Amino acid sequence: MPMKQLHLLVFLSGLLFVFGCAHHKAKHSNSQIEPSFGPEKGTLLIIGGAARDPLFLNLFKEYAGGDNAKIIVVPTAYDDQQIEQDSGFIRLKSTFERAGFSNITVLHTRDTATANMEEFIAPIREASGVYFMGGRQWRIADGFLHTKAHAAFNKLLDRGGIIAGSSAGATIQGSYLARGDTKANTIMAGDHTEGLGFMKNVAIDQHILARNRQFDLFEIIDHHPQLLGIGLDENTGILVHYDRFKVVGQHYVAIIDGTRWSNERDTIYQLPKYSKEFYFLKSGDQYDLRRRKVLIDKEIN
């Protein structure tokens, strides 16, 4: 073999080796990402705020067990003025009464000592549904994180119940608490970064299109690339069953998972590190949390 051809062969072989190593490293890196998932037995309904569509309370009622289901409503994300203006939670209860619920308990505390009291958590032990209201998500963490009430919420899911929430009540369900700063809700990674963790390895944002927030989750994902970023627009949610979710509602859900997905091309594109690309899912679309991929028709059963 002529020397020039030999040198070219060696050069091309080297390129193939480098490319193969890089490809293997990328595949290996992706395989090391811990899967995201929801509760194994229960259901989560996670709504991006302004939940005006009756669909959401109807779904909550369906999974909680109907009109007579015992439900818990948690308004702790409200500010003190909102709490004082509805001190008996009459207006809050009326929202659920108009939806047909007849057995409603409102649980509110800003004191973890209270959230550890048996008398306080007793209604959770009997309930089949919990609904977290909107406001500021760090207030929910301050009142409930790592308490007996928190454990009781998880046991409710173990019994096959449902936990729902809108806006702050959506974000608190993730393991990483986005917008959890006490100073301002524009700070993505603040002085509270741990959610109640009903969804594992996930950061959840809300109001994303209504408030032009669709790129904000990158401030978290860039520093915590193992997390799955889920951004929910208003009047839109996801219904989570263990390792899958389905989009419900009016608008879109943004997915930040290190890929760009094209439905028309039926293709998933792996993105480079620190890419600011994401994609949207619409009502009816389903997503595999463990494999981090959109489910196509033949994979849905």
Image (cartoon, rainbow, N blue to C red):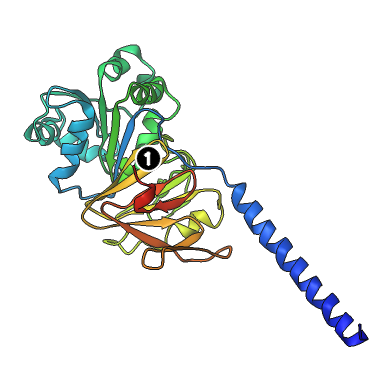
- The secondary structure type at the circle numbered 1 is loop
Residue 222: image x %, image y %? 54, 58
Side of 65 where 271 appears, left or right: right
Residue corresponding to mark 1:
172
Using the rendered view, name the quadrant where residue 65 is placed: top left
Residue 231: image x %, image y %? 37, 54
Residue 166: image x %, image y %? 26, 43
Question: Is 103 in front, or is 253?
Answer: 253
Side of 287 where 162 appears, left or right: left
Q: Is residue 136 visible?
A: no
Using the rendered view, name the quadrant where residue 245 is placed: top left
66 shown above or below 251: above
Q: Is residue 120 visible?
A: yes
11 shown above or below 222: below
Residue drawn at x 26%, y 53% is 283
Question: Is 56 in front, or is 180?
Answer: 56
Residue drawn at x 43%, y 54% is 187
Q: Amino acid at mark 1?
A: Ile
125 shown above or below 38: above
Side of 47 where 18 appears, left or right: right
Question: Is 192 in front, or is 26?
Answer: 26
18 shown above or below 99: below
Side of 155 where 167 appears, left or right: left
